[in-house]
C-alpha cells in the first residue's frame, strides 16, 4: 500500500481553506447516487486506458507516453505541439515538434491551457500589425482582451484553486474485507478520510472473476484536504510526511471498516493491514 500527496481536483477552497468535499460528498458521490441519476463510471481496466480506448473506437492514432510542453497555433490552421518522452528518466532526447489539425485539452493542470490560450491571444496581437481596417483591428483587440482574461483565470485556478490530498492504498485480511457491507463510501464524519473504495468493485480491475481473491482485500482511500495540508505544512513533501499520513490513514480506515461491519452485525475487527508509504507532491 502507499500514501501519496498530490494536488486535489475537488474544487476551490472555501474561506476556511477546505475543499468542498471535506464536508463529506467526494466528487458528488452521495448527491448523484440516486436511482434516477446517471451512473458513476470508472475507466476499465485502468484510468490510463480511457482516452486510448476512445481514440481507438474513433480510428484516431495515439501518441502515448508523451508529455506536451507547449501548444501554439500554426499560420493557416492547425496546432504545433512541443512534446517530449514521458516516463523514462534516462531518456535525454530533446523535445520534438508535432503538427496536428485540432487540439482538445483534458488535463488536471490549467497552466497548459493558460499558456495555450495566451498563444492564441498573441496571434491576435500579431494580426493587429498587418494593416487591416480600423474596424477589424478593434474586433481583434476585443478578442485578444477576452483571451488574455481567460488565460489569467486559468492560471489563477492553478495557483490558488487547488488543495493537497493524500491517496492511500492498503490490503486487509480477506475474510474481514469481504464482510464489509459496501464497496465505496463517502465519509462526512472523519477528519482524515473523505472517501474509500474496494478496488475489486471497479470493473476490469481483477484478473480473475471470483470474489474470493487477494485483490478483493485491497482498499483505496482519499484524505481530506485539511488533513493533507496540516501534514505537508509541518513536514513538507518528505518521507516523514508519507509515513505519518500512511499510519494515520491506516488506523482511520481500519476503524471505519470495523465500525461498518460491527454496525451490520457481521465480521470482527482485523488489525492485519499491509500499508507502507511512498510520497510525491505535485
Image (tube, grey):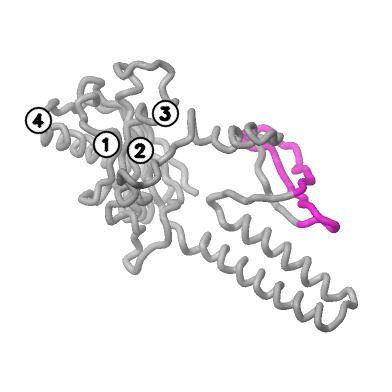
Q: Quadrant of residue 122?
A: bottom right
Report the Cα–Cα distance between label 4 and label 3.
28 Å
Secondary structure of the residue carrying tag 1 is helix
The first of marks 2 and 4 along the sequence is 2
Neighbour class for label 2 at 10 Å: few (<14), some, many (≥20)?
A: many
Report the Cα–Cα distance between label 2 and label 4.
27 Å
Secondary structure of the residue carrying tag 2 is strand
- Count of marks overlaid on the render: 4
Residue 252: x and y in percent read 23, 40
Q: Residue furthest bottom?
A: 134
Neighbour class for label 4 at 10 Å: few (<14), some, many (≥20)?
A: few
77 drawn magenta? yes
Q: Which residues are magenta?
A: 73-101
Residue tagged 4: 265
Residue tagged 2: 168
Marks 3,2: beta carbons within 8 A: no
Q: Residue at x 33, y 54 (%)?
A: 21
Horizontal side, residue 162 vs residue 145: left or right: left
Residue 72: x and y in percent read 75, 56
Neighbour class for label 3 at 10 Å: few (<14), some, many (≥20)?
A: few
Marks 1,2: beta carbons within 8 A: yes
Q: Residue at x 38, y 34 (%)?
A: 2
The first of marks 4 and 3 along the sequence is 3
Foreground of the two, 95 or 196: 196
Report the Cα–Cα distance between label 1 and label 2.
8 Å
205 drawn magenta? no
Residue tagged 1: 250
The first of marks 1 and 4 along the sequence is 1
Residue tagged 3: 203
Label 1 vs label 3, nearer the camera: 3
Q: Residue at x 17, y 36 (%)?
A: 260
Amino acid at each position: 500500500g502507499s500514501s501519496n500527496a498530490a494536488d486535489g481536483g475537488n474544487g476551490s477552497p472555501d474561506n476556511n481553506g477546505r475543499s468542498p468535499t471535506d464536508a463529506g460528498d467526494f466528487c458528488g458521490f452521495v448527491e448523484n447516487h440516486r436511482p434516477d441519476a446517471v451512473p458513476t463510471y470508472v475507466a476499465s481496466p485502468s484510468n490510463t486506458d480511457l482516452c486510448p480506448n476512445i481514440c481507438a473506437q474513433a480510428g484516431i492514432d495515439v501518441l502515448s507516453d508523451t508529455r506536451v510542453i507547449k501548444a501554439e497555433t500554426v499560420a493557416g490552421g492547425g496546432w504545433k505541439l512541443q512534446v517530449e518522452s514521458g516516463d523514462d528518466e534516462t531518456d535525454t532526447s530533446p523535445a520534438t515538434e508535432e503538427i496536428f489539425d485540432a487540439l482538445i485539452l483534458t488535463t488536471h493542470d490549467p497552466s497548459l491551457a493558460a499558456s495555450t490560450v495566451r498563444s492564441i491571444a498573441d496571434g491576435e496581437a500579431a494580426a493587429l500589425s498587418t494593416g487591416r481596417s480600423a474596424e477589424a483591428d478593434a474586433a481583434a483587440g476585443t478578442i485578444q482582451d477576452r483571451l488574455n482574461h481567460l488565460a489569467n483565470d486559468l492560471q489563477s485556478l492553478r495557483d490558488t484553486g487547488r488543495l493537497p490530498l493524500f491517496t492511500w492504498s492498503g490490503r486487509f485480511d480477506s475474510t474481514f474485507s469481504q464482510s464489509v457491507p459496501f464497496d465505496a463510501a463517502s465519509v462526512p464524519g472523519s477528519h482524515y478520510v473523505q472517501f474509500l473504495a474496494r478496488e475489486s468493485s471497479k470493473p476490469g480491475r481483477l484478473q480473475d472473476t471470483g470474489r474470493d481473491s487477494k485483490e478483493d482485500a485491497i482498499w483505496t482511500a482519499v484524505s481530506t484536504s485539511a488533513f493533507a495540508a496540516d501534514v505537508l505544512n509541518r513536514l513538507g513533501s518528505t518521507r516523514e510526511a508519507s509515513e505519518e499520513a500512511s499510519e494515520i490513514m491506516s488506523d482511520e480506515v481500519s476503524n471505519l471498516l470495523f465500525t461498518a461491519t460491527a454496525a451490520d452485525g457481521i465480521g470482527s475487527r482485523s488489525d492485519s493491514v499491509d500499508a507502507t508509504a511512498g510520497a510525491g507532491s505535485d
